Amino acid sequence: MLLMGHVPRGPDFEMTLAAGQSIAHLEEYTYTFFNPKHDNDDSHIVYDESRVPEAVQLTVKAGIYVTPTLSTYATIVQQATALDAFLKNTDLKYDPPWIQASLQPAANRYNNGFNISEYSRIRTSLALQRKLVKRWRTRKSR
Amino acid sequence: MTITPSFTRVLLALVASSLTSASVVKAQQRVDSGSATTVAFVHVNVVPMNRELVLTDQTVVVQDGRILKVGPAAKTDAHVHLQTPTEFPLYLANGVTTVFNLDGRPAHLLWRKKIAAGEMLGPAIFTTGPIFTQANKPKEAVRMVDEQAELGYDAVKIYNGVSKEASTHRRGQEKAHAVDGPRTTRARF
């Protein structure tokens, strides 16, 4: 039975790897591996690209699976920073009605959850996650 | 892709320039059923003789020397949260024939069963059980994981809230059950 999920903030990144847990969402790396204080305060995250190879190496060594869900985080950033543009996506009509309702300005958790001062941080997070994926791809081609 | 008799008669070339002989062998999947021999060439590029283009990353099914079907390789979405069966045709329409659902409930087991039996149209479903959202005492965690396994869930999904203390206890639990492989595997978080 596969063990899969977010990286628990308590056990943290390395203990999660040691348990053989596969990781859902690359953003989980930013909350744990890239947060030297190991807490839930996102302002403590250090988006240090020089540590990307180490993160990938530890993961590969652990032999776990990772589902990056990069496109999901990209849409989170867009909902937070440019909701009008996001809502113009005609494919949204295929979502169930209650999902469509949750995306509207009054109810959108990301548009209401991030203020302008955080836009730079979440954009930086997305850029770092993309570099993690690129590092993986580079390794695979060796 | 709609397969027509005329299409199956066109000459077809597998673009081997990028494939070594070893990878060609690897790309073939052979199925023997009765007297018929079926071979599937997967992840190959196809040059159809009736159009000026290359069809990339195709699966070509050949039965007894005759092309049976040509189509794009199926996709798997490795992280979905299935809400309702009304979503299923969307996956299929976009070539996604397998999904991994990350927040399971009994309905997903039912849908999985119906789809596998051909009673419902949808992608093949692999699913976790209901998410573990908080720390549990070791015995309780083991019981809950075993319960999910017995119900037929494919994986365990945990969330952010599992504490270091709980994890330590669970590691102890893992050690205590070191001789009980499957149970330990299910419980090691």
Image (spheres, coloured by chain):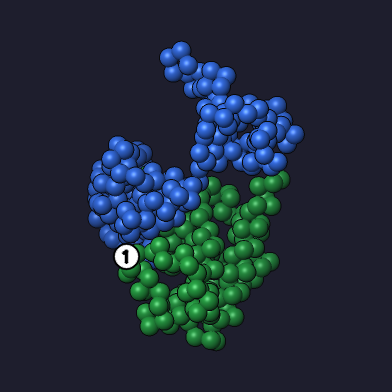
Residue A94 point in image, percent of width and height? 40, 62
Q: Residue furthest right?
A: B17
Residue A115 in view in this figure: yes
Residue at point 52%, 33% (across, down): B4
Taking depth in this image into account, of B184 and B29 the one nearest to the observer is B29
Q: Which chain is blue?
A: B
Number of on-image labels: 1
Task: State left or right for residue B139 relative to residue B33.
Answer: left
**Disc 1: which residue:** B134
Residue B9 point in image, percent of width and height? 59, 26
Q: Residue furthest front?
A: B6
Quarter of the rendering occupied by the N terminus of chain A: top left
Residue A41 point in image, percent of width and height? 48, 78
Task: State left or right for residue B122 relative to residue B30.
Answer: left
Task: State left or right for residue B28 relative to residue B105.
Answer: right
Residue at point 48%, 56% (across, down): A23
In the displayed structure, would residue A43 be above or below residue A32? below
Amino acid type of the residue tagged 1 in the rendering:
Gln
Q: Colour of chain A?
A: green
Quarter of the rendering occupied by the C terminus of chain A: top right
Label 1 resides on the chain identified as B
Under circle 1, the secondary element is loop
Mark 1: few, some, or many residues within 10 Å (few <14, many ≥20)? few
Taking depth in this image into account, of B182 and B38 the one nearest to the observer is B38
Residue A104 point in image, percent of width and height? 40, 78
Residue at point 62%, 68% (across, down): A128
In the displayed structure, would residue B180 be above or below residue A56? above
Taking depth in this image into account, of B29 and B153 the one nearest to the observer is B29
Residue B138 in view in this figure: no
Residue at point 68%, 33% (across, down): B49
